[in-house]
């Protein structure tokens, strides 16, 4: 099998490992879409997962080729809701973008959430122009804009809440 | 000073104490407005506050008369936002409701949030008929409905997001 064909079929792994902390931190910083504060939160969520397992409320999906992390998603049930899940993070390494890995990750993450009882999946993002690709990605994945909270993150930087009802 | 007049002037305390865990759990259960899961979360937030202090991200305000807990509020900065705070909890003991304690708690909590940099305060509640008093309370306190997420908590049970911009 040619090298590039192998790379087009990432392997998915649910179990978090200690080395994911550094790999996830590096990946989200490389995308340029997350602040340093957010990158640190991404790392902390891996630690919470490692320390508490399912009780952490954070579930992961890692897309890998060999030992390389291509992308990952982090999601979990929303406390107080019977069937809503939050897609906290989804990110693909800049060098791997545009090849459908995000869509594969999303579809696989949605299946895992559905297995755990999800009927509605929420995903938040910023209204800033920089996040137009993120918003287009959610729309392309079948999400719709459910709400807009102006100035949520900062003056002029609102929160857009997307939702997808699973059938 | 007559007893009832003293009771109309609750004392406010910010510092959480170990005994608040049980008192808060009892109070929120007594209101009938919170599920058992939510009551347990309310208790856990006290523990997180006691264990981690400000780093927990949870700040409290307790309204007391003598050793009796009349009500309390829990709030904190929203991670990733520069100036938005979440009012996670506000509850008044059933026997003390209708005397303005909620309004006093809200005003004092808003002042504490403003001191910590809050420019916008968010508060979520359910769209169920049972929570009409809660929604009226937020409106009376100067909050406006910013978003509605249908079926968020359960089928037929949506989330209403209120916001107040501090001037």
Image (cartoon, coloured by chain):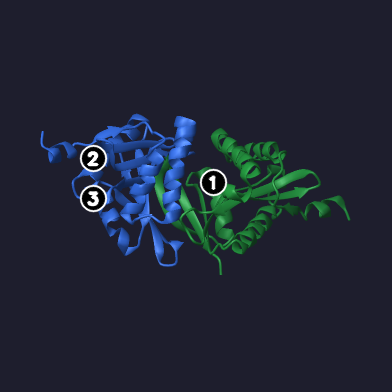
Chain colours: A blue, B green
Element carrying mark 2:
helix
Q: Are marks 2 and 1 in contact (CB under 8 Å)?
A: no
Which residue carries the number 3 mark?
A95
Q: Nearer the viewer, mark 2 or mark 1?
A: 2
In this picture, residue A147 sits left or right of residue B164: left
Q: Residue at x 86, y 50 (%)?
A: B3
Q: Callout 1: few (<14), some (14-19), or many (20+) C-alpha neighbours within 10 Å?
A: few
Q: Are marks 1 and 3 in contact (CB under 8 Å)?
A: no
Whole-number angstrom distance, CA of label 2 to CA of label 1: 40 Å
**In the image, which disc is placed on residue A104?**
2
Whole-number angstrom distance, CA of label 3 to CA of label 2: 16 Å
The answer to whether one can see residue B60 in this image is yes
Q: Are marks 2 and 1 on the same chain?
A: no
Looking at the picture, does residue A105 appear above or below residue B8?
A: above
Could you say which is closer to the camera, residue B133 or residue B48?
Answer: B48
Which residue carries the number 1 mark?
B131
Q: Circle 1 marks a residue in which chain? A: B
The tally of labels here is 3
The spot of residue A49 in percent (x, y) is 45, 35
Element carrying mark 3:
helix
């Amino acid at each position: 099998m040619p090298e590039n064909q192998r790379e087009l079929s990432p392997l998915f792994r649910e179990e978090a490992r200690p080395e994911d902390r550094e790999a996830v931190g590096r990946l989200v910083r490389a995308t340029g879409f997350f602040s340093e504060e957010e990158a640190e939160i991404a790392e902390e969520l891996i630690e919470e997962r490692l320390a508490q397992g399912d009780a952490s409320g954070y579930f992961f999906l890692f897309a890998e080729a060999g030992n390389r992390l291509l992308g990952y998603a982090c999601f979990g049930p929303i406390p107080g809701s019977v069937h809503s899940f939050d897609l906290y993070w989804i990110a693909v390494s800049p060098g791997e973008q545009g090849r459908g890995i995000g869509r594969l990750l999303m579809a696989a993450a949605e299946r895992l959430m559905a297995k755990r009882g999800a009927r509605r999946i929420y995903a938040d993002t910023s209204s800033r122009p920089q996040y137009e690709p993120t918003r287009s990605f959610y729309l392309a994945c079948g999400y719709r804009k459910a709400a807009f909270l102006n100035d949520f993150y900062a003056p002029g930087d609102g929160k857009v809440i997307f939702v997808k009802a699973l059938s």
